[in-house]
Amino acid sequence: MSFKIVVDSCCDLTAQMLKDPCFVKVPLTIHSNGSTFVDDDTFDQADLLWSMKQSEQAPSTACPSPQAYLDAYECGVEDVYVVTLSALLSGSHNSAEQARVLLEEEEPDVNVHVFNSCSAASGEVLVALKIRELAQSGMPFKKVVREVEQYIYQMQTLFVLESLENLRKNGRLTKLQAVVTGALKIKLFMGATPEGEICKLGQALSMKQALSKLVDKIASDPNHVGRTLVICHCNCKERAEKVKEQIMAKCQVGEILVVGAGGITTVYANDGGVVVAY
């Protein structure tokens, strides 16, 4: 194989997908309530969810070092594609870029491109799968890069969370928004801006209503037709499957994949969260 796809661990590829040797995952680290969780094969979601519930403080995350990325790039292939979390949410993208500069000095013949997914979780999965599809077709490196950058630009990420606690503690939402929604138990329906920042799209009085708004939003977007869609869930497979059924009934998407949240997605989506990208 002449290419590799290096992803950070917010890219929630399934165990089956990760069996494909083209994928290499570089883990982030999570600190919660005095414990450290490495977001790799050793990650235990139940432990992290319990730890976060016990803690007054927000869990913190540490992105991979440039060296960790560099080690992943040095895999003896000509073309290395890298997919990271939104650069506005994490330093993972910056670390990956630093490693690219180092590799260009050491091995100038290797092609490396770092994609800012402008998303997370489901969005990163879509980007990684699109790269694999194009690279396996024999498309040249520069053309893959162009096509995938365009794909990222057109991609939509939507999510509904059971709890906004971690986003509030991490300063990703304004305090007022979190207080209002917490007091009234309102569920926010949110998305990502084209630049990869979190934005509010609507609100509802229940999870069911909020998810229904999410499905309606997809149905009303003419660009969803025929696209692959990924639903990522945090510890709520049944909820994700119901959302899949609703999308199948109302939308004309192509394939729908359901994936479980890894460690970093668990931190941000929290117990019961659903993230959809297409």
Image (cartoon, rainbow, N blue to C red):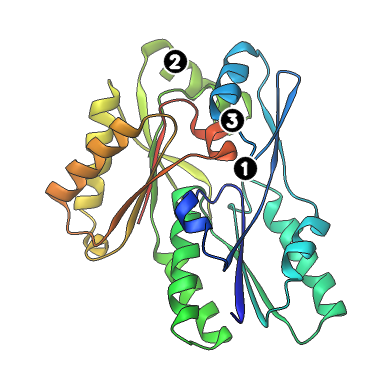
Instruction: Give amino acid for label 3.
Output: Asp
**Residue where numbered disc 3 is placed:** 44
Q: In the image, residue 95 lies at what x, y percent?
A: 76, 57
Q: Earlier in the sequence, mark 1 or mark 2?
A: 1
Amino acid type of the residue that numbered disc 2 sits on in the rendered structure = Gly
What is the number of the mark on residue 182?
2
Tag 1: residue type? Answer: Asp
Q: Is disc 1 in contact with disc 2, using a CB cutoff of under 8 Å?
A: no
The residue located at (42%, 19%) in the rendering is 181
Cα separation, mark 1 vs mark 2, equals 34 Å
Image quadrant where one finds the N terminus: bottom right
Q: Position of residue 66 (x, y in %)?
A: 80, 58
**Counting other residues with Cα less than 10 Å from the Cα at mark 2, is it few (<14), some (14-19), or many (20 or more)?**
some
Where is 229 relative to 267, above or below?
A: below
| Residue situated in front as seen by the camera: 198 or 230 | 230
Name the N-terminal-most of marks 2 and 3: 3
State the quadrant of the C terminus: bottom left
Whole-Å distance between the Cαs marked 3 and 1?
Answer: 9 Å
Residue beneath disc 1: 41
- The spot of residue 224 in percent (x, y) is 26, 60
Residue 56, placed above or below residue 139: above
The answer to whether one can see residue 180 in this image is: yes
Q: Secondary structure under badge 3?
A: loop
Disc 1 is placed on an element classified as: loop
